[in-house]
Amino acid sequence: MSETEAYLERPAARPVRWTGLHGAREDLRSGVLTVLVLALAGLPVGLLWLWLAPRASFRVTATGVEPIGATPSSELFMADDGVYLLVLAGLGLLAGLAVWLLRRHRGVVVLVALAAGMIAAALVAWQLGQLLAPGPSHAELADVGGAVTTGLHLGATAAVAVGPFAAVLVYLVASTLTSRDDLGRADRDGEPAPALASEEQPAG
C-alpha cells in the first residue's frame, strides 16, 4: 500500500469541542439567585440594625428640646454607624461561607454575584432602617410638651462596602485553601464533559 493510499484510509479527525463554558448557564442562574437572596437578606438586617442601634428620647420645651433621663453622650450619634457596620460584616462572613459551600457553582460568576448581592443587602438595610426610624418631624418638634426620639441615620456611607468586603474575603481565603485549579467544583471532579464522553466510545 502506498503512502497516499494509507493517508486516505486514515480515519477522519474528530472535531475538537471547547468546554470552557461548560456550566456557564447554570452559574449565571445561580449568580442571579444569589443576588436576589442577599438583597432580601437586607430586610432582616435592616430590622436588626433598627433594634440594636441606641436612640435617645427628648422632651420638647418652649426653648428647644431637653433629654429625658441621662444626657446622651456624643458617641450615641456614632453608634448607628458602628452597629450597621458590625451587622453587615456578620452577614458578609456568613454569606461568603454559604456561597463557597455551593460546591457546584464555585467560580468568578458567583463571586461577582456575591459582591453585588452584598451591596444590594447593604443598601436595602440602610434604606429600611432610615425609613422605619426617620426621626422627629417639624410638627413634632413644634409640639411643646411632646416627646421625640432620635432617628436612625448612617453618617459614614463607606460602611456599605464592609459587607461585600467581608464576603469576598471569606470566599477568596477559602479558595486559596484548596489546591485544585477547578476550585473543587462538583461537576468537574475529573469527569469528562458529556459531549466528549460520547465521542470516546469505540466505533462498532
Image: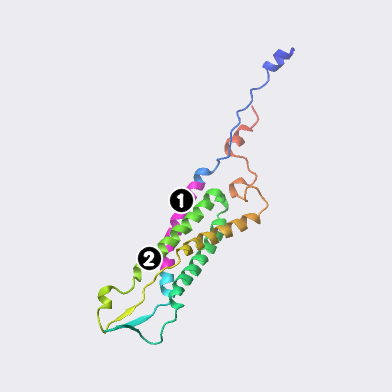
**Which of marks 2 and 1 precedes in the sequence?**
1
Q: Residues within 10 Å of mark 2 (few under 14, many from 20)?
A: many
The secondary structure that most of the magenta stretch takes on is helix
Q: Which mark is residue 32?
A: 1
Query: Is residue 8 among what the camera can see?
Result: yes
Looking at the image, which is closer to me, 58 or 47? 58
State which quarter of the image contains the C terminus. Answer: top right
Q: Position of residue 3 (x, y in %)?
A: 73, 14
Does 2 sit above or below residue 96?
Answer: above
All told, the count of numbered labels is 2
At horizontal 43% and vertical 77% (from top left) the residue drawn is 54
User: Residue 125's spot in the image, x, y percent?
Assistant: 42, 64
Residue farthest to the bottom, as pictured: 69
Q: Where is residue 96 in the image (x, y as percent from the top left)?
A: 54, 59
What residue does disc 2 label?
128
Question: Which stretch appears magenta?
Answer: 27-46
Marks 1 and 2, how far apart at CA: 22 Å
